[in-house]
Image (spheres, rainbow, N blue to C red):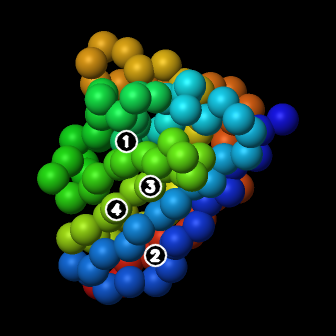
Amino acid sequence: QVQLVESGGGLVQAGGSLRLSCAASGRTFSSYAMGWFRQAPGKEREFVAAISWSGISIYYADSVKGRFTISRDNAKNTVYLQMNSLKPEDTAVYYCNQGGSMVDNSDYRPRAGYWGQGTQVTVSS
């Protein structure tokens, strides 16, 4: 079973930056698309960003376009989420997902059961 471990969360002031990492176990990381999601208290989990196995296709939610950047290093089995110009509404637990489907040139359907434990991001105003 693949293990996904997120890190890099924390407390930051509005306008600040954080870089999240998601490290995956296993030898097939480079074969799969990866996605980032977030869940704020009392809200459903929502899509943030996704990247294809090659890194060529990248999708973002409208709410983070121009502020967040997803990238991957297949040699390190790691996907990253660089978050700049953070806003209080970005506060959430952030999760990575492995092996979902990139569809409709803008969306990512997560793969059930392939989630990390999450990392908390808190943005103060």
> Badge 2 is on which residue?
122
Amino acid type for the residue under numbered disc 4: Gln
Measure the C-alpha gap from mark 4 to mark 2.
15 Å
Q: Nearer the viewer, residue 78 or 65?
A: 78
> Which mark, residue 49?
1
> Badge 4 is on which residue?
82
Q: Is residue 28 above or below residue 116?
A: above
Helix, strand or loop status at disc 2: strand
Q: Position of residue 31 (x, y in %)?
A: 56, 25
Q: Position of residue 104 (x, y in %)?
A: 30, 14
Which one is earlier in the sequence, the residue at label 1 or at label 2? 1
The answer to whether 113 appears left or right of 73 in the picture is right
The residue at the point 30 percent across, 29 percent down is: 56
> Which mark, residue 119?
none
Q: Residues within 10 Å of mark 1 (few under 14, many from 20)?
A: many
> Badge 3 is on which residue?
80
User: Where is the C terminus found, in terms of image quarters?
Assistant: bottom left
CB under 8 Å between callouts 4 and 3?
yes
Q: Nearer the viewer, residue 113 or 58?
A: 58
Helix, strand or loop status at disc 3: strand
Question: Looking at the rendering, which quadrant does residue 87 occupy?
Answer: bottom left
